[in-house]
Image: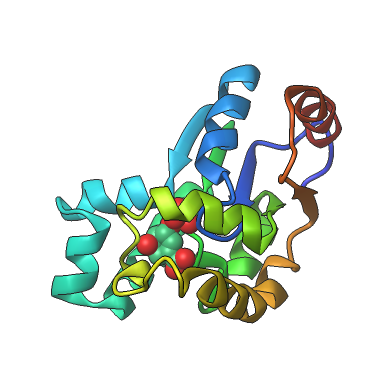
Amino acid sequence: MTHPGTTTRIYLIGFMGAGKSYWGRRWAKAMNWAFFETDDLIEAREGMTITAIFETKGEAYFREQERIVITALATTENAIVSTGGGLPCFGDNMALLNASGITLFLSASPATIAARLQTARKKRPLLNGITPEQLPAFIEQRLAQRLPFYQQAQFSLEVNNLDDTTLSSLLQTLT
Ligand code: S3P
């Protein structure tokens, strides 16, 4: 694990809709660090959207791309990396993240996630075919499967009511 004062990259992990991108962008700006999203890097490499990759090449291919992207990012300096919601749950990705930076689990309740995902389905092929009524149960079930991976993060932060004050003290603790 990296030690305070020498951290050069922070990985944000957590479920879709937890706010990894929203908070990651703000933190990167506040720290004057670069911000990366694994989904964006994959879309740029592949020249197509996440949804199109799932449709034409399949989820397994997408998961391989996630691994390639985090391997490349593991040597990037002064960066906040927002990882796709499923990324920590495949292969030994969590071990790679923990070995190459600070990992921070943004933890949100199923209710918070459901509210955010009702309006933000774009780029989220896993939600295809799931009705608004089915969404809460889908989230509860998927979150339960994923929590054992997310909980391997070095730090965790409850983001249901996160504000900028909590944010500043957190940044001072981590860096
Ligand atoms: C996924 C989450 C998405 C994206 C892809 C798969 C998942 O990222 O990587 O749709 O498996 O949970 P976000 O967590 O940024 O929505």
- State whether residue 68 appears in this view: no
Q: Nearer the viewer, residue 55 or 175?
A: 55
160 or 118, which is in the foreground?
118
Image x and y of residue 36, in percent: 45, 39
Name the quarter where the N terminus is drawn. bottom right
Query: In the picture provided, is 37 more to the left or to the right than 82?
Result: left
Q: Position of residue 43 (x, y in %)?
A: 25, 51
Ligand 1 in which quarter: bottom left
Q: Residue at x 51, y 61 (%)?
A: 85
- Of residues 81 and 20, which is closer to you in this image? 20
Q: Height in image: 41 above or below 65? A: above
* Residue 73 in view (yes/no): yes
Where residue 40 sits, quadrant-wise, is top left
Q: Up-down: is 90 above or below 23? A: below
Where residue 2 sits in the image (x, y, percent)?
Answer: 77, 47
152 is higher (above) or lower (below) than 35 = below
Side of 34 where 140 appears, left or right: right
In this rendering, the answer to whether 54 lies above or below 104 is: below
Which image quadrant for residue 175?
top right
Identified at 61% across, 58% down, the residue is: 14
